Image: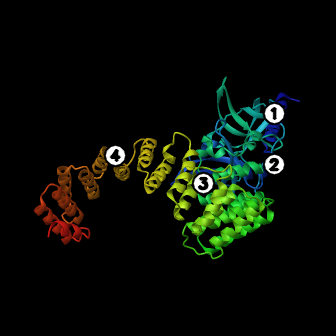
C-alpha cells in the first residue's frame, strides 16, 4: 500500500473519531429543557439582573446564583420553549458560595428537571455544561474535572478544565450520563489553561429556610416571599416570626402553604382564621375565618387554646369598630367561648381575657372579679393590677382602695421605674388628689418627672402645681405654673392660676399684673375681671373693684353677683 493511501486511511480514522466525540449525548435534547433564563426586578418593576438557572425537581424547584436576586422584589423564569413563570418563593440561599434555591409557580403539572448525581465524578472525568438556548441545535460544552474539593466535609466543589463565557454561568454541569453534579461559576486562566468552578448540586439543594432566616442579611436583601422550613415545628416558629414582618397578603399566602404541607395541624387553621379576620373586606371573609376556627377545633387536642383564640378574635373584632357587620361575633359570644376554655383549664390568660370582655360589656363587678383572680396568679403584673384599679375606679370605689391596687401595680414594675411604666405614677398621683393626700401626689408627680427624664409638657406642670398648691407648697406651685406659662404662653388659664396663687399668699400687686395681662390677651374673659376686682378689694380700691365686677357680670360671669352685693351696694 503506497504512502498516500496510508495517510488517507489515517486521516479518515481521525476524522471519524472526532465526529463520534463531537456527537452530542443522547440525553441532551431532553435535559436542555430543564435550563431556563431568569430576570429579576426591583421594587419599581425595573429589570435588575438576568442570568441562568435550572430545575432540580419536576414540581418547580430551581437553583441559580444568589447575586441575581440581591435587591429583587420579583423574578420570573423563561423556559427554552418561551414559557414565562414567576418565582413564588425563596427556599434557601448561601451568600458566601453565591447560590440560591427557589420555587417557581409552574404552569403545568410537571416541568423537565435534571436528575441529581449521587456520586462525584473522578478527576479527569468528562463533564458537560448545558447553557440556556432557545435554538434548535443542541448546544453544550465539554471538559474534564481538574480537582474535587469539599464544602463542610460533605459537599463537593469542582475545578473544571474549561473556560466559560458569561452566558454559560449558573448553568448545570452534568456527568456523561446526564446527571447534574453542580452549577457553573466564573473561572480564570491558571498556568496557561482556562479553568472554571462549579458548586456541588447537593450543597445547593441542602440550602433551606430556618426559623431565623427572615432576620439573616442574605434573606433581608431579597424582597421575594420566603418559603417554609421543611420541619413542621420550625415552620410554626417561622410563621410566628413572619407574622410581624410580612404584609398581610404575604403572611396569608404563607399560611396557605403551611396548611397545604401540614393539613392536620390545627394551629395552621387557627392562625389563618386570625389573619383572615384581620384583613377581612367582606362578610364572606369573616365566614372563612369562622370556618377555619371550626376546622382547628376538629383537629386540636388542646381545644381550650382554640376556644381562647376564638374568644380573643371576637373580642378584638368588637373593640375595633368594624365597618363590616358579622352578627355571630358578639361580645356575649366571646364570653361564651372564653368560658369554654376556662372550663377545660383556668389559665391566667383566659381569666384576663374574660375580664377584658366583661370590662367592655361594662359589667365592672364581673371584670373586677376576673382581674382579682389573675392577680392571685403568677401572671400578676403591673398591667393586671392597673386593670383592677381602673375597674374599681369605674365602680366608684374609695380612692384608698384604688391606691392600694396601684401600689401593687407600681411594686410590680422594675425599679427604678422607666419611662414606659411612668404613667402608672400619674394614675396614682391623681388618686392621691382624689383622696386629698396632696403631698403624696406631689411625690408621685416628682417620681414621674424623674422617670421620663424631665420630658414633660405644660399640662404636667399645671397638674403638679395643683397638687403643690393644695399641699401649701406655694413656691413650688408658683415655679410650676411659671413653667406651664413658659411652655404655653397663650393659655390664659395658666396666668389666671398664677394670679390665684399670688392672691392666696397676699401678693396682690403681682396678681393684678398677671390678670391685666390676661385681659390684654382676651378682653372678654369675665373670670379675669372678677379676680381683678377681688385683688382691688384687697388693695382697698373698692370703686375700681366695682367697675371690674360690673364688667365681669356683663361678660356673663355667674360667680360675681355675691361680690357685687357685698361690696358695691
Residue at image location 70% in from the left, 45% down from the top: 210
Q: Closer to the N terminus: mark 1 or mark 2?
A: 2
**Disc 4: which residue:** 473
Q: Of the numbered discs in the image, which one, if any, rests on residue 384?
A: 3
- Asked if the residues shown at circle 1 and circle 3 are in contact, with their CB atoms under 8 angstroms apart, the answer is no
Residues at marks 2 and 4, CA–CA distance in whole angstroms:
96 Å
The residue positioned 44% from the left and 57% from the top of the image is 434
Cα separation between marks 2 and 3: 70 Å
Quarter of the image holding residue 316? bottom right
Image depth: mark 1 or mark 3 in front: 3
Q: Nearer the viewer, residue 120 or 354?
A: 354
Decide: is 347 above or below 13.
below
Could you give the CA–CA distance between mark 1 and mark 3, rounded to whole angstroms? 72 Å
Identity of the residue drawn at 67% across and 23% down? 191
Q: Within the image, what quadrant is residue 197 found in?
A: top right
Q: Local crowd at mark 4 within 10 Å, few (<14), some, or many (≥20)?
A: some
On residue 27, the disc is 2
Compared across the picture, whether 485 is left or right of 174 comes to left
Residue on which the image places disc 1: 125
Quadrant including the C terminus: bottom left
Q: Which residue in the rendered view is the most extreme toward the top?
A: 191
Question: What secondary structure is marked by label 4?
Answer: loop
* CA distance separating discs 1 and 2: 18 Å
Nearest-to-viewer mark from 4 and 3: 4
Compared across the picture, whether 12 is left or right of 129 comes to right
Residue 515, visible in the rendered structure = yes
Amino acid at each position: 500500500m503506497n504512502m498516500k493511501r496510508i495517510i488517507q486511511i489515517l486521516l479518515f480514522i481521525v476524522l471519524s473519531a472526532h465526529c463520534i466525540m463531537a456527537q452530542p449525548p443522547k440525553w441532551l435534547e431532553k435535559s436542555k429543557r430543564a435550563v431556563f433564563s431568569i430576570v429579576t426586578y426591583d421594587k419599581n418593576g425595573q429589570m435588575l439582573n438576568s442570568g441562568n438557572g435550572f430545575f432540580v425537581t419536576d414540581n418547580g424547584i430551581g437553583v441559580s446564583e444568589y447575586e441575581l436576586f440581591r435587591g429583587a422584589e420579583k423574578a420570573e423564569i423563561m423556559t427554552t420553549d418561551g414559557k414565562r413563570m414567576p418565582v413564588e418563593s425563596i427556599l434557601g440561599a448561601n451568600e458566601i458560595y453565591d447560590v440560591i434555591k427557589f420555587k417557581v409557580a409552574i404552569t403545568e403539572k410537571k416541568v423537565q428537571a435534571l436528575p441529581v448525581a449521587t456520586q462525584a465524578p473522578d478527576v479527569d472525568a468528562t463533564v458537560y455544561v448545558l447553557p440556556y438556548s432557545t435554538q434548535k441545535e443542541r448546544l453544550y460544552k465539554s471538559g474534564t474535572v481538574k480537582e474535587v474539593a469539599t464544602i463542610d466535609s460533605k459537599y463537593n466543589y469542582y475545578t473544571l478544565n474549561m473556560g466559560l463565557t458569561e452566558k454559560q454561568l449558573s448553568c448545570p454541569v452534568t456527568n456523561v450520563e446526564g446527571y447534574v453534579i453542580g452549577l457553573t461559576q466564573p473561572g480564570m486562566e491558571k498556568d496557561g489553561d482556562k479553568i472554571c468552578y462549579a458548586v456541588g448540586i447537593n450543597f445547593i439543594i441542602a440550602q433551606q429556610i430556618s426559623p431565623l432566616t427572615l432576620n439573616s442579611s442574605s434573606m433581608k436583601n431579597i424582597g421575594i416571599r420566603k418559603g417554609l422550613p421543611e420541619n413542621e415545628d420550625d415552620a410554626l416558629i417561622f410563621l410566628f416570626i413572619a407574622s410581624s414582618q410580612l404584609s398581610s397578603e404575604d403572611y396569608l399566602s404563607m399560611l396557605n402553604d403551611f396548611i397545604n404541607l401540614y393539613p392536620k395541624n390545627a394551629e395552621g387553621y387557627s392562625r389563618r382564621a386570625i389573619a383572615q379576620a384581620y384583613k377581612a373586606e367582606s362578610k364572606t371573609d369573616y365566614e372563612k375565618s369562622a370556618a377555619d376556627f371550626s376546622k382547628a377545633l376538629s383537629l386540636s387536642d388542646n381545644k381550650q387554646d382554640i376556644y381562647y383564640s376564638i374568644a380573643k378574635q371576637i373580642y378584638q373584632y368588637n373593640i375595633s369598630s368594624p365597618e363590616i357587620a358579622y352578627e355571630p361575633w358578639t361580645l356575649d359570644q366571646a364570653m361564651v367561648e372564653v368560658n369554654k376554655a376556662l372550663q377545660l383549664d383556668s389559665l391566667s390568660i383566659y381569666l384576663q381575657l374574660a375580664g377584658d370582655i366583661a370590662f367592655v360589656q361594662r359589667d365592672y363587678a364581673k371584670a373586677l372579679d376576673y382581674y382579682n383572680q389573675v392577680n392571685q396568679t403568677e401572671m400578676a403584673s403591673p398591667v393586671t393590677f392597673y386593670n383592677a384599679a381602673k375597674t374599681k375606679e369605674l365602680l366608684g370605689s374609695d380612692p384608698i382602695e384604688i391606691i392600694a391596687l396601684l401600689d401593687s401595680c407600681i411594686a410590680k414594675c422594675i425599679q427604678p421605674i422607666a419611662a414606659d411604666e411612668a404613667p402608672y405614677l400619674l394614675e396614682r398621683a391623681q388618686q392621691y388628689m382624689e383622696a386629698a393626700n396632696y403631698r403624696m401626689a406631689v411625690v408621685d408627680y416628682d417620681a414621674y418627672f424623674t422617670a421620663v427624664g424631665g420630658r414633660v409638657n405644660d399640662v404636667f406642670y399645671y397638674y403638679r402645681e395643683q397638687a403643690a398648691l393644695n399641699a401649701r407648697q406655694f413656691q413650688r406651685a408658683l415655679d410650676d405654673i411659671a413653667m406651664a406659662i413658659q411652655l404655653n404662653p397663650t393659655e390664659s388659664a395658666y396666668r389666671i392660676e398664677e394670679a390665684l396663687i399670688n392672691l392666696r399668699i397676699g401678693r396682690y400687686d403681682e396678681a393684678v399684673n398677671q390678670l391685666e395681662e390676661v385681659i390684654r390677651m382676651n378682653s372678654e374673659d369675665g373670670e379675669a375681671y372678677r379676680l381683678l376686682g377681688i385683688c382691688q378689694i384687697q388693695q382697698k380700691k373698692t370703686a375700681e373693684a366695682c367697675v371690674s365686677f360690673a364688667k365681669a357680670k356683663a361678660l356673663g360671669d355667674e360667680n360675681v353677683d355675691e361680690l357685687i352685693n357685698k361690696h358695691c351696694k
